[in-house]
Image (tube, rainbow, N blue to C red):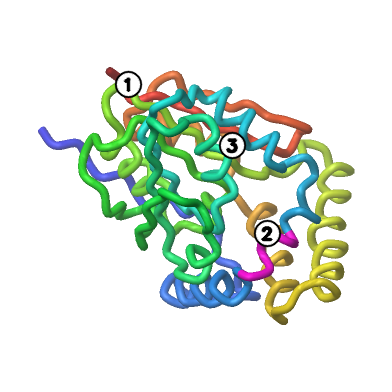
Amino acid sequence: MQEPTPAILPPHAPLADYYGDEEEHQRYLRRIFDDTAPDYDRIERVLALGSGPWYRRSALQRAGLQPGAEVLDVGIGTGLVAREALTLIGAAGRLVGVDPSPGMMGQVALPGVELVRGRAEALPRADASSDFLSMGYALRHIADVHAAFAEFHRVLRPGGRLVVLEITKPEGRVGTAVLKGYMRGVVPLIAKVVARGHDTAELWRYYWDTIEACIAPASVLEALREAGFEDVQRHTELGIFSEYTARKPG
């Protein structure tokens, strides 16, 4: 008997300040990421809070990325996670980046990386074609967590591993208030000063609003298990940087 398809699981409730239905949501994302791509790395360095090259490389190592691996980086953006993955897989490895934003991918300057336009819910890759899959800070921008994780399971080889990096709210109200003030107030203000595009400040306000509205980490872990993954775990750094890791059964 065929197993029922899981119900759609959005990463957060609709954010009416930015869009209405899902079609408007996708148009909004294409516009905001394409328009702000030239400023993204500059503002990310301001936002960093420790999530710089060292942290991303360490997270990939904790997730089990090995030299020579074939990596699929979903939501590659400007290549921040992919850059660190390349240092770990070496010349014998291979990396493919998938993203729905041509503007973001236009900022990727990583020799040897294959860039493919696509979405997490319908990855344009063959079954069992990757050893390792990464997604850096893009889970909140997809439409359906269940569909994305099913695709992750499909494209990984047996025994393949994944890591999903995200920023999550601190557990306490004080910590949440401090992070909200920084990300929704300070970072957009800095963006207005140093960014070239007028939409960049809006992007970082939206960034926080998706963090605040995001489904709980327990729901992410359960969705990974429902997709067929094992060894599903969550590791946190500084109380806000979440690393969801899992392995496809071999």
Which stretch did the figure color magenta? Answer: 38-43
- Image coordinates for residue 163, horizontal then vertical, percent: 50, 34
From the image, tell me which residue sits under label 2. Answer: 41
Of tags 2 and 1, the one toward the viewer is: 2
Q: Is 173 a magenta residue? A: no
| Quadrant (top left, top right, bottom left, bottom right) of the N terminus | top left
| Quadrant (top left, top right, bottom left, bottom right) of the C terminus | top left
Between the C-alphas of marks 2 and 3, the distance is 26 Å
Q: Earlier in the sequence, mark 3 or mark 1?
A: 1
- At x 70% / y 35%, what residue is drawn? 54
From the image, tell me which residue sits under label 1. Answer: 159
Between the C-alphas of marks 2 and 1, the distance is 33 Å
- At x 53% / y 24%, what residue is drawn? 233
- Image coordinates for residue 55, horizontal then vertical, percent: 69, 35
What number is the disc on residue 93? none
- Image coordinates for residue 43, horizontal then vertical, percent: 75, 61
Q: Amino acid at mark 2?
A: Asp
